[in-house]
Image: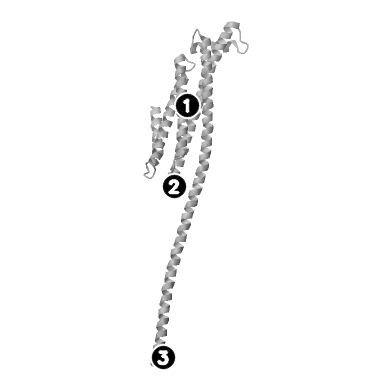
Amino acid sequence: MSYDISFKKKRQEEDIESEGLTDSLLPKDFKDKSAQIENQLSSFSYKLRELDRLMEAVGTTKDNEKLRIQIREQMTQCMTVLNDCNNQIKDFSKLPTVNQKATSLKKDKQKAFEEKLEDLRQRFQKTSQKIKEKEQLFIDLATNRDSQYSNNHDNERTAAQMAEKQQSLKLIAETDNMEEVIKQRKQDINKIESIMQNINAIAKDINVEVQNQGEKLVRLDQHMTSAANNVQAGNEELVQAREHQRKGGKCLIYLIIACLIAIGIILTIVFTGKKS
């Protein structure tokens, strides 16, 4: 029940974040890409929960070859979704914007996407590390058991520690082909390490992308500020020009009136002189 409440609360928060996407001024590809990224992030989160569930079974009586196959498949799927999310966020960052409001919204949404992806990436990395440690523990326990049976001593551990590990080993698995199981688990560890390297590589890629996008957004803000200032300056010059034109028009009218008055005075003087 608590999980359902938490999930509903999270969905409500995501719906609130998406309200701005209903703005009619935003292009359709902007909205579509945002929805696509949200769906991919949700899918990634779900797959991580499944991977956590499988991880909890490692080292228990449920630990078997079927479980390891499921873990490998789930880790591969998580890695694929992680790559897809990263690429989609990159594509989102390249979408053009039609106005300052869209630019601001794009900046906020991209930051939110990157933060969510980084959080999921870290969860994926931690779960992978736990699986690796549990697999390594199985190998250590199996190796120590064989060593004890063959040499009947263990210089590195006390008898109590070995007894505890022997009991743990029985819980993990009882099999006749232990060497093959150990070999397979070592291969699993190598695959996990390879995936973790890819996770770290994506983390670096995300950080570089965040830095580059930050610089681009700063430059864009500067350009938009400069353009706004130029528009304002142009409007002020236009107002001044209109004011000068208005004043110039008044001066011309005054000049014409003065000329007419002067002409009238001159004509009056002329006619008066003739009559004299």
Give the residue displayed 50% in from the left and 43% down from the top. Answer: 217
Q: How many angstroms separate mark 2 from mark 3 (CA)?
A: 76 Å
**Which residue has dot 2 on it?**
100
Mark 1 lies on residue: 79
Q: From the viewer's perspective, is residue 60 above or below residue 94?
A: above
Q: Residue at x 54, y 20 (%)?
A: 190
What is the spatial separation of the Cα atoms under label 3 and label 1, in whole angstroms?
Answer: 110 Å
**Is residue 206 visible from the viewing direction of this image?**
yes
Question: Can you name the residue that lies furthest to the front here?
Answer: 274
Q: Residues within 10 Å of mark 2 (few under 14, many from 20)?
A: few
Q: Quadrant of the C terminus?
A: bottom left
User: Helix or strand or loop: what does disc 2 sit on?
Assistant: helix
List x then y, in percent, for residue 73.
45, 21
Picture residue at 44% right of the left edge, 66% below the top: 245
Mark 1 or 2, nearer chain start: 1
Query: Which labelled disc corresponds to residue 220?
Result: none
Q: Which residue is under mark 3?
A: 273
Disc 2 marks which amino acid? Gln
User: Which residue of the protein is positioned furthest toward the right in this rendering?
Assistant: 155
Mark 3 residue element: helix
